[in-house]
Amino acid sequence: MTVIAVAVLAAVAAVTRGAIAVAANQGRFPLGTLAVNLVGAFAMGVANTLDGTAADAVRVGLLGTLTTWSTLAAETVDLSREGHHLDAAAYLGGTVVAGIGLAFLGLRLAG
């Protein structure tokens, strides 16, 4: 895995995630973060069928940067602190369950 490939893909993913969050995280529910995390989970399943340096760069640089556990955690806490406990639980639980399911689906479809 080359550091340059990881850095380039990470830059692309960070800008993409930021743009999606700005466009889609309108209102109280963070749909943009949910979308990138679920798409990224599916793509990670697909990427896990690949081998070599390019696959490592895609998994670490692109998908590792596109998806975001820390933002999921912060947005879940924010929803809860604002009194939206059911939304917080649904967001966290739904992201984890759907993300794992989509990762397995990507793995299965690509494998």
Image (cartoon, rainbow, N blue to C red):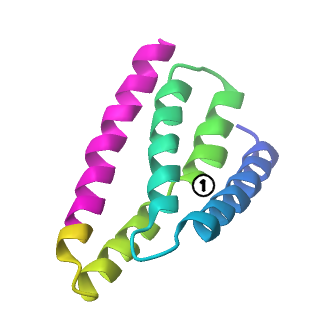
> Which residue does the image show at 58% across and 39% down from the upper left?
59
Question: Which residue range is magenta in the image?
Answer: 89-111
Residue 55 horizontal side relative to residue 97, left or right: right
10 over 76 or under it: above or below:
above
Name the residue carrying label 1: 65
Q: Residue at x 23, y 79 (%)?
A: 84
Q: Residue at image x 52%, y 60%?
A: 32
Residue nearest the observer in this picture, 111 or 39 = 39
Q: Main secondary structure of the magenta part?
A: helix
Which quarter shows the N terminus? top right
* Residue closest to the eye, 98 or 56: 98
Q: As drawn, which residue projects farthest toward the top?
A: 111
Mark 1 element type: helix
Residue 97 in the image, given as x and y percentages of width and height: 26, 44
Residue beneath the point at 38% across and 33% down: 102
Number of residue marks: 1
Q: Is residue 84 left or right of residue 55?
A: left
Eyeballing the image, is 93 above or below 28?
Answer: above
Relative depth, front residue between 98 and 60: 98
On whether residue 104 falls in the magenta region, the answer is yes
The residue carrying pointer 1 sits among few (fewer than 14), some (14 to 19) or many (20 or more) residues within 10 Å by Cα, namely many
The kind of residue tagged 1 is Thr
x%, y% of residue 16?
Answer: 69, 56
